[in-house]
Amino acid sequence: MRNHGYLIYDQLFALDAKLEPQAADGESWMVSDDKLTWTFKLRDGLKWHDGQVVTSTDVVPSIRRFTDKDVQGGLLAKVAQEMTAVDDRTFRIVLKEPFGLMLKTLAKSASVPLFVMPKRVAELPISQQISDTTGSGPFIFKKDEWKPGEKVVYVRNPDYKARPEPPSGLAGAKIAKLDRVEWISIPDGQTAINALLSGEVDMLEEPAHDLLPVLEKDKNVEIVAVNTLGSTYVLRFNWKQPPFR
């Protein structure tokens, strides 16, 4: 579900390759001398998949939803006095006491990231399953082609405005290089490997480690450790360049 979120939503801040928070939907921010008032400004030109403009009135309830669901977000909620939209592109968080993890919390990538959602979605009860998948990210979820447990389909968002910086980790420019992405569910590890080797699928995520020697023997397969801790592998079948970024 987290990977699904990263395709269709954006964050206010994102962690770069050095795990440092960088602006994503955010453009700039200021902190008062007493470290209690944080004022953020959104990038211009952000749009939802339905063409509507992303505004601060969407961001504030998205933050509140995040702080209700996430442990680290809950720490922010405990010290937050108020969160308010100042204008369409500006919002403010006023604290009761300084919170040194502000940017790292807003950029959180694991467990429950802070995804920016439309106000109507962000204000739904956190216990309610989300059926409205409108986001502002680089891909659009094709709900009409979704087959639960079998296939998930995304198409490139033609109106997505990428950041100007080079990509780094989850930060920087997110440039979709594919017009369409299909996630195919193949529960059996050996069947998934065979599908990759035969060219039926282009990529596998986290294959069984005991099958890596089989893949290493095929010259058309590239094994990439995208997580430096070694817990995630991505395998590409005869690609000239990465499909994303």
Image (cartoon, rainbow, N blue to C red):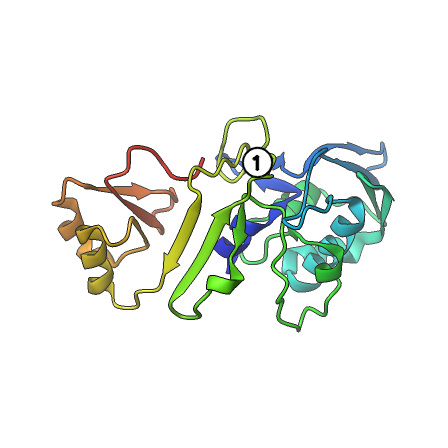
Q: Is residue 3 above or below residue 102?
A: below
Q: Amino acid at mark 1?
A: Glu
Q: Which residue is at a point 80% across and 50% down the rendered structure image?
A: 57
Q: Is residue 30 above or below residue 232?
A: above
Q: Which residue is at a point 37% across and 68% down the rendered structure image?
A: 150
Q: Quadrant of residue 101?
A: top right
Q: Secondary structure at mark 1?
A: loop
**Residue extending furthest toward the front:** 144
Q: How many marks?
A: 1
- Could you classify mark 1 by the number of other residues whose Cα lies within 10 Å: few (under 14), some (14-19), or many (20 or more)? some
User: How far across and down, in percent of the image, does residue 164 sit?
Assistant: 58, 26
Q: Which residue is at a point 33% across and 33% down the rendered structure image?
A: 241
**For residue 73, side relative to residue 180 (left or right):** right
User: How far across and down, in percent of the image, does residue 201 sit?
Assistant: 28, 53
Camera-side residue of 146 and 35: 146
Q: Which residue is disc 1 drawn over?
A: 20
Camera-side residue of 61 and 139: 139
User: How far across and down, in percent of the image, does residue 22 sit?
Assistant: 61, 34
- Which quarter of the image is occupied by the C terminus? top left
**Residue extending furthest toward the bottom:** 127
Q: Which residue is at a point 66% across and 73% down the rendered structure image?
A: 127
Camera-side residue of 180 and 220: 180
* Residue 161 seen by the camera: yes
* Residue 110 seen by the camera: no
User: How far across and down, in percent of the image, does residue 188 sit?
Assistant: 25, 68
